[in-house]
Image (spheres, rainbow, N blue to C red):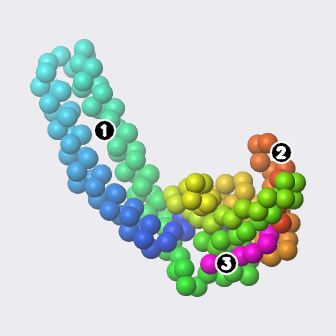
Amino acid sequence: MSSDTNYVKKETFEQMKVELQHMKGVERPAASRAIAEAREKGDLKENAEYDAAKEAQGMLEAKIKQLEGVLATARIVDEENIDTSKVSILTKVTLTNLKTKKKVTYQIVSEKEADLKQGKISAFSPIGNGLLGKIVGETAEIQVPAGVIKFKVEYITA
């Protein structure tokens, strides 16, 4: 799986578009106003408010550029047509940790949708990437910072 493509659900794609429009239509003009107000306060060499406003604008522009890149490479995945014969993007996989015997369920998602508290892990994380393509009954040996974890794939659902 290439990290050049961002696989997302339709609602995530729509949320990202709304977020981008908000940044461009609301936050960008506010940043410009903040710079203009700071500029009016005098000598730019010693104007910390101006420096802070310029830095905030630079960070906003970087976020806009990053989000535009994600949207440009986004591919909307139809949840109705998910192949559950193997672990892939948007599948839910129930695993057994072979060392601890604990069961856990993860949904494999794009980096933008990843949220471990909700059981959503990125397809590009070590565990997500290590599970891609596995089938029920197969064991995945995944290298993580703490060492190697062995998971047995128990179920795969949409």
Residue sitting at 64 percent across and 73 percent down? 91
Left/right of residue 90 with respect to residue 48 in the rendered view: right
Q: Which residue is mark 2?
A: 147
Find the magenta span and give its range.
153-158
For discs 2 and 3, the disc positioned in front in the rendered view? 3
Q: Which residue is mark 3?
A: 157
The residue at the far left in this view is 40
Q: Position of residue 25 (x, y in %)?
A: 23, 54
Residue sitting at 74 percent across and 82 percent down? 85
Left/right of residue 135 with respect to residue 116 in the rendered view: right
Left/right of residue 49 with respect to residue 17 in the rendered view: left
How packed mark 1 is, by other alpha carbons closer than 10 Å (few <14, some 14-19, many 20 or more), is many
Quadrant housing residue 20: bottom left
N-terminal-most mark, 2 or 3: 2
Q: Mainly helix, strand or loop, the magenta region? A: strand
Quadrant housing residue 140: bottom right
Q: CA distance from mark 3 to mark 1?
A: 43 Å
Residue sitting at 52 percent across and 80 percent down? 78
Q: In the image, what residue type sits under mark 1?
A: Gln
Q: In the image, what residue type sits under mark 3?
A: Thr
> Mark 3 and mark 2 in contact (Cβ < 8 Å)?
no
Q: CA distance from mark 2 to mark 3?
A: 28 Å
Residue sitting at 29 percent across and 25 percent down? 51
> Mark 1 and mark 2 in contact (Cβ < 8 Å)?
no
Q: Is residue 116 above or below residue 6?
A: above
* Front-most of residues 63 and 111: 111
Element marked by disc 1: helix
How packed mark 3 is, by other alpha carbons closer than 10 Å (few <14, some 14-19, many 20 or more), is some
N-terminal-most mark, 3 or 1: 1
